[in-house]
Image (tube, grey):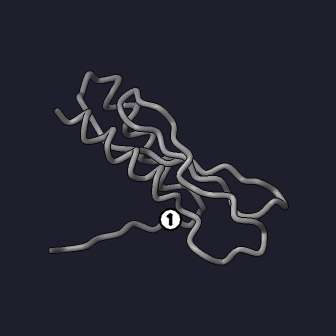
Amino acid sequence: MKIAFTMAHERGEIDRLLAGLANRLLAAGSRICGTIQTNSERGDLGPCDMDIKVLPDGPVIRISQSLGVASQGCRLDPGALETAVHLVEQSMT
């Protein structure tokens, strides 16, 4: 198995790039599935909120938990991630 990653200078740049690509593919009539992520800053309330949109026209799901400003553990919501995976699987059939 080969693993790859992408990096960008600006926070959220890759997410915006992928969202733009997904929108162009949809506009061209392509059938796509998966998710795209959007981060929303929370100011002084702690780390950003993380949402994903299930493609092509599914719901937006909050995948992060608000654990407080001092929290240093993983903020991902396993139940929300499981829901997103299920919805993507359904869209592939």
Seen from the viewer's position, the closer of residues 37 and 64 is: 64
Residue at the image position 51 percent from the left and 41 percent from the top? 61
Q: Quadrant of the C terminus?
A: top left
Query: In the image, is 35 to the left or to the right of 30?
Result: right
Q: Write down the quadrant of residue 68 in the picture.
A: bottom right
State whether residue 48 is above or below residue 71: above
CA neighbours of label 1 inside 10 A, class few (<14), some (14 to 19), many (20+): few
Residue at the image position 29 percent from the left and 23 percent from the top? 28
Residue at the image position 23 percent from the left and 29 percent from the top? 31
| Residue 52 picture location, percent across and down | 49, 45
At label 1, which amino acid type do we have? Ala
Query: In the image, is 29 to the left or to the right of 66?
Result: left
Q: Write down the quadrant of residue 56 in the picture.
A: top left
State whether residue 13 is above or below residue 24: below
Residue at the image position 49 percent from the left and 48 percent from the top? 37
| Residue that extends furthest to the right in the rendered view of this protein | 44
Seen from the viewer's position, the closer of residues 27 and 57 is: 57
| Residue 73 picture location, percent across and down | 61, 76
| Residue that extends furthest to the front in the rendered view of this protein | 79
Q: Quadrant of the N terminus?
A: bottom left
Per the image, label 1 sits on a secondary structure element best described as: loop
Total tally of numbered discs in the picture: 1
| Residue 19 picture location, percent across and down | 45, 41
Seen from the viewer's position, the closer of residues 76 and 19 is: 76
Seen from the viewer's position, the closer of residues 80 and 50 is: 80
Query: In the image, is 45 to the left or to the right of 48?
Result: right
Find disc 1 in the rendering and name its residue: 8
| Residue 39 picture location, percent across and down | 61, 51
